[in-house]
Image: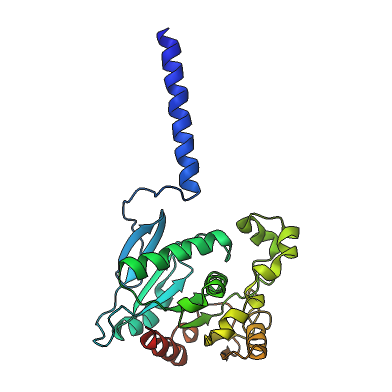
Amino acid sequence: MVSSRLSSRLVLFLQVSLLGSVMASLGWVRAETTAPTKTLPIPGETFLVNGREAFIIPAKRTNSKHHRTPWVWYAPTLPGLPDKEELWLFTRLTEAGIAIAGIDVGESFGSPAGRVGFSALYEELTQRRNFAARPVLLGRSRGGLMTLNWAAENPDKLAAFAGIYPVCNLASYPGLAKAAPAYDMSAAQLEATLTEHNPIDRLAPLARARIPLLMVHGDVDTLVPLEDNSLAVRSRYFALGGQCRVIVAHGQGHNRWAGFFQNEELVGFVIEHALRAP
């Protein structure tokens, strides 16, 4: 009898534990609230949003004419990113009175699940922390997929987009076979619905909202080719009546060349639009 009761309790415990794990994985419950410890190029705050690691690097000064905090939304926030390469850029932004924030949505490649995580961060910062309603999105490499796909569904929630060799085309990088699991699809299914998920096919809402784009990209980038990504965006955006500038870094590939991260035109563009946004 005692053994039977213990077995029943063990089964019940396992069932409850399994249910809790499933609910957490689906985002139905918040994960533990213990603050994560993430190394940032400039000291900031790390916290959880719906169980996902997020960060804020605060501005070094406040802007008296802004009632809400201007900010730049950086992606991808993955282990090791943002890194020391962003130190110069982030320092310039914070000295101008602009905060930087981001959230780790994993290797989501701009998928719907990753977009949900982005929306959770946006709500946290704009509804609970008095951040401005329209940040500037800053996508580095595959962060371009994340930011541009979220932007396509939320054109009224951003002031501008800036990219450092940004991925804009899923077929170019990481390729449909590698991206498909993040979309909970097979490669064939993703290919059949690609225009619903590929940033270069989702630019019309941004053009209608008159969102300016600026990207710096190397012309010998073999990982994220210039022609299939930034130049393809520029061509399509112009055709839609949008404003887009691509700064071509001659002789540069997908690397950590300082010119990508210490670009005066890019930082000026970001500061201008971040401070202008409400």
Asked if residue 85 is positioned above or below residue 17 in the image, the reply reads below
Tell me where residue 128 appears, x and y as whole percent.
Answer: 31, 66
Foreground pick, 260 / 24: 24
Q: Is residue 101 left or right of residue 197?
A: left
Tell me where residue 225 appears, x and y as whole percent.
Answer: 66, 79
How many marks the image carries: the answer is: 0
Q: Quadrant of the N terminus?
A: top left
Residue 40 visible in rendering: no
Tell me where residue 41 appears, x and y as whole percent.
Answer: 35, 72
Tell me where residue 202 appears, x and y as whole percent.
Answer: 63, 76
Q: How is the image coloured?
A: rainbow
Foreground pick, 151 / 180: 151
Residue at 33 percent across and 62 percent down: it is 46
Residue 94 visible in rendering: yes
Residue at 54 percent across and 86 percent down: it is 216
Asked if residue 139 is positioned above or below residue 8 in the image, the reply reads below
Q: Quadrant of the C terminus?
A: bottom left
Foreground pick, 258 / 114: 114
Residue at 65 percent across and 74 percent down: it is 169
- Residue 85 occupies quadrant: bottom left
